[in-house]
């Protein structure tokens, strides 16, 4: 089964609202083996809705619509559906009772506009809506199913989760779709593609690879389809194992992992703690770390040392060192990492200093220059220089990723040292 998703609402076309509904629906459909053929966003225009609906019905056996079912004049989806499926509106007492109770619970009474929402197409199956006043409609004609739901995300998700997805599964699963994402850091998309060209060429013909670059991270998504999930998992796992052998130094996680959660789990496993000293990132790394539930078990705190005097007073960075090497240097980053580790008495300390931009760069140290350092026990310090670019927000995100990725490598190295020492 293939699906055609139609999102109705001018607010999405002018950038006022992000179309999160379609993304959620596509993911949920993939989970039950339904491929999404196309997602289309259109205005609340009768002709546009009718034309797009016809495209969807002609191409796919499942058409999903969100939006345009409200009580106001610009909500015309119900009327267009009635015309398309040669249906007429009739009063549905159950829907009216639902609307009445919903409004009563909120201290409101049923208006004529609300009552009009209880007029539903006589050829559609009604999907009840416990979180709003607009019911959903399910039209079936032969092998084609057209389902219309409200555009409010939590209303749509309730209908999809409790009614639509279950009913689609009951019709019989045609296939399984498996997506496996390998997360990498420290290498660009083109360099990664060159390293993996032979492996990519040898992939089975029914398995697809997609490169998904973001700020400082490249995701490798493998997609396979088939009749047996167990067989799909075996085949995909086999290809992931090959990847691990090819680029072990770049892989840090899988699927929905985050760098902060990955390093947090490693810190817990090693019974270790962490503190951070940030300059150009302004607390961004601390924010990400503390966004992980349970991070208080291993994260002590942070010093945002934006000015040099804070670096000196709070982190004991030597004044002469700053004068000689500058705030953006290996020496300063390493001193910051050691300073925060000693101050907060943690196992590891991160120090980050750089020029986020758009101003402040020099010929020697252009905008985007960032130094990251990780201080470990016994005063061992690992540091690395990065040259990101001239976009401030992107530089902060990439610096955060770089710091967490470098910490992960240090944790991996220390874990391996511990294993060797026990042999």
Image (cartoon, rainbow, N blue to C red):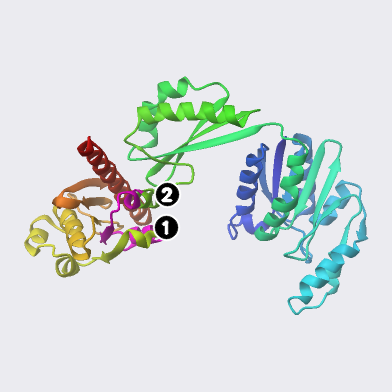
Specify the quadrant that holds the C terminus.
Answer: top left
Q: Is residue 23 magenta?
A: no
Numbered badge on residue 17: none
Tell me if mark 2 has few (under 14), some (14-19) or many (20+) residues whose alpha carbon lies within 10 angstroms of its own: some
Residue 339: image location, x then y, percent: 17, 61
Give the position of the N terminus as an image quadrant.
top right
Label whose residue precedes the other's in the sequence (2 or 1): 2
- Dividing the picture into quadrants, the one containing residue 185 is top left
42 vs 308: above or below = above
Mark 2 → mark 1, Cα distance in angstroms = 9 Å
Residue 200 position, x and y percent, is: 45, 24
Q: Nearer the viewer, residue 35 or 101?
A: 101
Question: In this view of the protein, can residue 118 be seen by the observer?
Answer: no
Towards the viewer: 252 or 390 = 252
- Image position, residue 361 (x, y; %): 23, 55
Residue at image point 85% right, 56% down: 79
Mark 1: give few (<14), some (14-19) or many (20+) Cα within 10 Å. some
Q: Nearer the viewer, mark 2 or mark 1?
A: 1
> Which quadrant holds residue 277?
bottom left
Residue 284 is covered by the magenta coloring: yes
Give left or right: position of 251 versus 14.
left
From this viewpoint, which residue is outermost toward the front? 423
Q: Position of residue 89 (x, y in %)?
A: 91, 57
Q: 156 and 375: which one is in front?
A: 375
* Residue depicted at 81% across the width and 68% down the height: 99
Q: Are marks 2 and 1 in contact (CB under 8 Å)?
A: yes
Give the extent of the magenta segment: 266-292
Residue 258 image label:
2
Element under label 2? loop
Place residue 191 in its image quadrant. top left
Q: Which residue in the protein does label 1 denote? A: 292
């Amino acid at each position: 089964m293939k699906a055609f998703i139609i999102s109705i609402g001018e607010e999405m076309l002018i950038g006022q609202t992000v179309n999160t509904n379609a993304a959620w629906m596509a993911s949920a459909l993939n989970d039950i083996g339904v491929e999404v053929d196309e997602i289309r966003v259109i205005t609340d225009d009768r002709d546009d809705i009718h034309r797009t609906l016809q495209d969807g019905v002609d191409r796919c056996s499942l058409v999903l619509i969100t939006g345009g079912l409200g009580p106001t004049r610009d909500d015309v989806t119900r009327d267009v559906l009635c015309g398309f499926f040669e249906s007429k509106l009739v009063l549905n007492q159950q829907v009216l009772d639902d609307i009445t109770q919903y409004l009563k619970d909120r201290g409101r009474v049923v208006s004529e506009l609300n009552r009009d929402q209880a007029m539903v197409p006589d050829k559609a199956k009604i999907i009840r809506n416990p979180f709003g006043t607009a019911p959903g409609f399910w039209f079936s004609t032969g092998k084609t199913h057209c389902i219309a739901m409200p555009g409010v995300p939590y209303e749509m998700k309730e209908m999809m989760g409790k009614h639509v997805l279950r009913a689609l599964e009951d019709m019989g699963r045609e296939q399984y779709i498996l997506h496996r994402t390998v997360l990498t850091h420290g290498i660009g998309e083109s360099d990664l593609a060159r390293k993996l060209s032979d492996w990519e060429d040898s992939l089975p013909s029914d398995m697809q690879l997609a490169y998904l670059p973001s700020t400082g991270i490249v995701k490798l998504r493998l997609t396979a389809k088939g009749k047996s999930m167990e067989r799909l998992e075996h085949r995909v796992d086999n290809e992931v194992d090959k990847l691990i052998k090819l680029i072990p130094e770049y892989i840090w996680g899988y699927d929905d992992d985050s760098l902060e959660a990955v390093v947090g789990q490693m810190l817990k496993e090693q019974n270790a703690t962490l503190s951070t000293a940030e300059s150009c990132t302004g607390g961004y790394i601390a924010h990400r770390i503390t966004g992980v539930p349970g991070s208080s078990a291993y994260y002590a705190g942070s010093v945002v040392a934006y000015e040099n005097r804070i670096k000196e007073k709070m982190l004991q960075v030597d004044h002469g060192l700053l004068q000689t090497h500058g705030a953006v240097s290996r020496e300063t980053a390493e001193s910051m990492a050691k300073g925060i580790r000693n101050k907060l008495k943690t196992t590891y300390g991160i120090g980050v200093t750089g020029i986020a931009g758009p101003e402040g760069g020099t010929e020697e140290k252009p905008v985007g220059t960032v130094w990251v350092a990780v201080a470990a026990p016994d005063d061992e310090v690992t540091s690395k220089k990065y040259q990101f670019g001239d976009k401030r927000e992107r530089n902060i995100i990439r610096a955060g990723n770089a710091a967490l990725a470098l910490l992960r490598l240090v944790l991996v190295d220390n874990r391996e040292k511990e294993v060797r020492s026990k042999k």
